[in-house]
Amino acid sequence: MYKQPGQEEFLFYMLYAGATMLSLIACSYLLFRRGNAFAPDITSSARLRRWTAALFASTTLSHVWYLPGVFLTSDDDIVLHDLVGGLLDYMTVIPLSIVIMLCMLQDSRRPLWLAWAMVTPLILGVAVCIAIRSYALLPMILTYLLLLSIGLLIYMVRAIRQYGRWLRDNYADLEHKEVRQSFVVMAFLLLISNIYEFGFEWPAYDYVVQVLGIVIVCYLLWRVETLSDLSIPIQSDKPIAVNDADEETDTTEDVEDNALLSIRYNIGPLLKQYCEDTQLYLQYDISLSQLATLIGINRSYLSKHFALQGMTYNAYINSLRIQHFINLYHETVETHQPVSAQQLAYQSGFRNYNTFNAAFKKIKGMTATEWMQRVKS
């Protein structure tokens, strides 16, 4: 006889259904909406949108698959149903989560098939369990999942730091480009996966898993929409191997070549003519490649020029913007006009006041407010 669900079970089913519908709606939104509802002025990555939609679709199907399991009564049927669901998750949800993290790094050369290669042992292990209709290999599967999670966290920390260095070398403004939050997303995804797979026995377990799933869907949807699409492939930071005997000579020659390069191509005066005198630095989000094209210099030469000066491209542009802010401040004070640090920051090329404050403090050693108070006194 069918048993009427209690109040707690009814609440869980409502939460489960809500998570399923949210995943389906998010998938449909990413696939069929052309514009950006969260940040209309940002062009998000079409590649990232498609893969995230695929993750939401697989999550929806996973929820649909597990729902009939509550009506099964035979132990063999329950085991088989759970194992098949686990196999589907390892083939779709887990690798797609890894793919999204890789796509957020915006390097088109980074192979995505590695995500499925990583989970192949999990797929094979669950396939064997299905064949023997037993959880016998489950401890080994969970151990591999835990090790995989730790390895991915370490890899993402390293990759995100490398990505951040590349951004500072190539972009004047880092707003809507940083992906340090992607590490948080990865940590949440891995947390959900491990909690779900290890199946901790505590009263709120099922509810926590569903709530975390809803949080991840909302977070991923927001992150995809607010992350700017960067079409320039990330340059490898891998150093070129040299012989020990030639290492000192090569380093000295590289420094001399870079110095001659700056003189030969007249990069310093060109930057003053086309970037500083014209106040091109006030243009939001101008990239290293765009500036190199404008002054007629190879992008790598311009990058080496900044490296020779001991700064990044981002630091160069921000220094010009901070100096512009200082000039505007003095002009405003001299004309006895009301001073607004935020407005002057926007007029100096910054679109985010927090970004401006961070740049100002890095250059001047204090916040803009502290600096203005010191100058006024």
Image (spheres, helix red, strand yellow):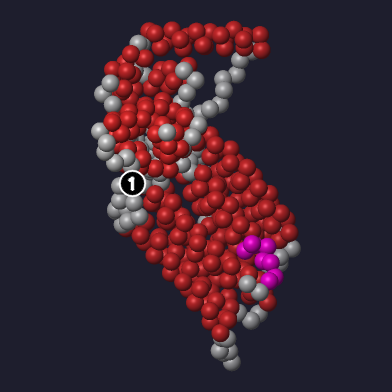
Judged left or right of residue 146, residue 310 is left
Judged left or right of residue 136, residue 79 is left
Residue 82 in the image: above or below residue 331: below
Give the secondary structure at mark 1.
Answer: loop
Which residues are the magenta region? 195-202
Residue occupying the far front of the picture: 377
Residue 359 shows in the view: no
Residue 95 or 306: which is nearer the viewer?
A: 306
How crowded pointer 1 is (Cα within 10 Å; few <14, some 14-19, many 20+) is rated as some
Q: Where the C terminus falls, by quadrant? A: top left
Q: Is residue 129 found inside the magenta-colored segment of the image?
A: no
- Identify the residue shown where x is 39% and y is 8%: 263
Residue 124 x, y percent position in the rendering: 64, 54
Residue 239 x, y percent position in the rendering: 57, 23
Q: Is residue 201 found inside the magenta-colored segment of the image?
A: yes
Residue 137 in the image: above or below residue 109: below
Q: Total number of numbered labels?
A: 1
Residue 175 x, y percent position in the rendering: 40, 41
- Identify the residue shown where x is 53% and y is 57%: 93
Give the residue at mark 1: 42
Residue 366 shows in the view: yes
- Identify the residue shown where x is 44% and y is 20%: 306
Q: Quadrant of residue 342?
A: top left
Judged left or right of residue 220, residue 245 is right
Q: Where the N terminus falls, by quadrant? A: bottom right
Residue 257 x, y percent position in the rendering: 47, 9
Q: Amino acid at mark 1?
A: Ile
Residue 322 or 285: which is nearer the viewer?
A: 322
Residue 12 in the image: above or below residue 340: below
